């Protein structure tokens, strides 16, 4: 028996204000159906986060309908669970009718999870569908008041199931699973905060293969047969070096499960260019195949040139979807870098530059640097008391200081 393991489709998702539902997600659905034609799996498991929002837009609903219809036409079993982004009630609408077409969608959590047993030669393969678990919901369903953690809740749900140890048991789950305290490698497109929802992989020991969703990077957790499929498209530039393959699982027997990565074409891949504005513009003029990319440009100029964004857009066109700054750390002299005894006279201008860079991700421009030097000159002339506490300076002197600063600002207003 063979099945595709998918997860985190997130139909309706945006990538830096680009609606992926317009081109990228429909392109993937057709490419995936082509892969089903080519590899002829017996089933498809979708492990949660079918939609990006609990109330999905109409385009996302229509795309999911296209996917299900295509799979039904190919006479493939389909097993679906809701993730934390899905509404279990909306997702499982008319699931009773769909089951007559081999499409099984788990709804809200119940004491007995949806289980479908499929004959496979002289063995049985059982698919168990576990929706995203919240401890409060598990406590209510099981009638217990001692389940405060996700790990305890998952174990309690699994213990309540009748699991045939002789069958090949497949679990679809959508949780944050760790192996011995080691978390999976996260992506920048996830909404997980800290250690929320942690479950140790040992909770799933009764299952021969665990088809996980929730983490967007494809990877195993603890053992080869506990796996995140990862999201099928690029949802964040942190995923730029990740391959977006399909996970094809072949069940050859109890304890004999093979996992294969199957390439799938995408409408757009990600590309990142970095450098000064001139370097970015030069790279963009030479770059071919922009139409097949979403591009992030990283500006490394200490000062942003005027109209930089407009120039980048002229060169990169619609492929440019994100621009950010990464200002190189400025080189300071040994005196400026020095710390320790006898360094109370450290350059205030250097310290200000560091502070400004830390707060604004850029160094002050020429006019700002001149203003800082003027202010420091005034403060030096009037003594360090004013730096520590302006109220310590006599009123007539502070008025003189203010007058000097304002005069300087007026003279340099054109800058």
Image (cartoon, grey):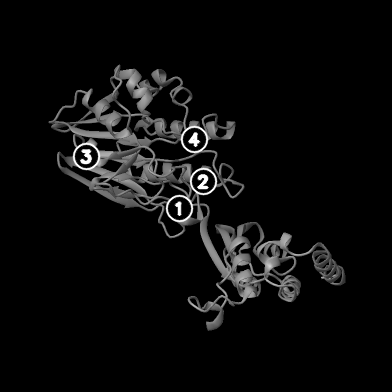
Tell me which numbered mark, 2 or 3, is placed earlier along the sequence: 2
Tell me which numbered mark, 3 or 1, is placed earlier along the sequence: 3
Answer above or below: position of 147 versus 38: above
Between disc 3 and disc 1, the foreground one is: 3
Q: CA distance from mark 2 to mark 3?
A: 37 Å
102 left or right of 11 in image: left
What residue did someone put label 1 on? Answer: 265
Residue 414 at x, y percent in the picture: 85, 70
Between disc 4 and disc 2, the foreground one is: 4
Q: Nearer the viewer, residue 397 or 377?
A: 397
Answer above or below: position of 331 versus 217: below
Q: Are marks 4 and 1 in contact (CB under 8 Å)?
A: no
Q: CA distance from mark 3 to mark 4?
A: 29 Å
Between disc 3 and disc 4, the foreground one is: 3
What residue did someone put label 2 on? Answer: 27
Q: Nearer the viewer, residue 153 or 77?
A: 153
Identify the image quadrant of the C terminus: bottom right
Q: CA distance from mark 1 to mark 2?
A: 9 Å
Disc sitting over residue 51 in the figure: 4
Tell me which numbered mark, 3 or 4, is placed earlier along the sequence: 4
Disc sitting over residue 309 in the figure: none
Label 4's element? loop
Label 3's element? helix
Q: CA distance from mark 4 to mark 1?
A: 21 Å
Q: Are marks 1 and 2 in contact (CB under 8 Å)?
A: yes
257 left or right of 321 in image: left
Between disc 4 and disc 1, the foreground one is: 4
């Amino acid at each position: 028996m063979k099945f595709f393991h998918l997860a985190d489709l997130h139909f309706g998702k945006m990538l830096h204000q680009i609606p992926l539902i317009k081109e990228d997600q429909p392109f993937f659905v057709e490419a995936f159906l082509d892969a089903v034609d080519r590899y002829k799996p017996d089933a498809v498991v979708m492990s949660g986060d079918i939609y990006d929002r609990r109330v999905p837009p109409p385009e996302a609903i229509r795309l999911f309908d296209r996917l299900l219809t295509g799979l039904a036409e190919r006479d493939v079993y389909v097993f679906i669970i809701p993730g934390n982004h899905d509404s279990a009630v909306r997702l499982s609408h008319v699931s009773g009718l769909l089951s007559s077409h081999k499409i099984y969608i788990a709804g809200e959590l119940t004491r007995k999870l949806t289980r479908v047993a499929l004959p496979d030669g002289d063995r049985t393969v059982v698919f168990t569908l576990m929706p995203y678990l919240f401890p409060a919901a598990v406590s209510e369903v099981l009638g217990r008041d001692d389940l405060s953690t996700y790990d305890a809740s998952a174990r309690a749900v699994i213990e309540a199931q009748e699991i045939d140890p002789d069958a090949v048991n497949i679990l679809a789950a959508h949780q944050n699973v760790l192996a011995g305290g080691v978390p999976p490698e996260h992506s920048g497109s996830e909404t997980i905060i800290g250690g929320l929802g942690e479950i140790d992989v040992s909770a799933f020991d009764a299952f021969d293969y665990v088809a996980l969703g929730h983490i967007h990077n494809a990877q195993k957790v603890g053992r080869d047969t506990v796996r995140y499929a990862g999201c099928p498209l690029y949802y964040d530039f942190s995923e730029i070096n990740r391959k977006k393959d399909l996970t094809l699982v072949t069940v050859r027997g109890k304890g004999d499960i093979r996992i294969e990565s199957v390439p799938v074409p995408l409408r757009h891949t990600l590309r990142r260019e970095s450098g000064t504005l001139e370097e970015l513009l030069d790279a963009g003029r030479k770059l071919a195949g922009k139409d097949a990319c979403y591009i992030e440009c990283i500006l490394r100029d200490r000062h942003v040139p005027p109209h930089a964004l407009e120039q980048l857009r002229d060169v990169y066109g619609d492929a440019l979807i994100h621009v950010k700054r990464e200002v190189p750390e400025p080189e300071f002299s040994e005196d400026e870098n020095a710390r320790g005894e006898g360094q109370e006279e450290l350059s205030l201008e250097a310290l200000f530059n560091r502070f400004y860079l830390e707060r604004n991700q850029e160094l002050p421009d020429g006019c700002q640097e001149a203003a800082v030097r003027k202010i420091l000159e005034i403060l030096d002339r009037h003594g360090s008391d004013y730096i520590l506490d302006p109220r310590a300076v006599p009123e007539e002197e502070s008025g003189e200081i203010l007058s000097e600063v304002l005069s300087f600002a007026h003279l340099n207003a054109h800058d």
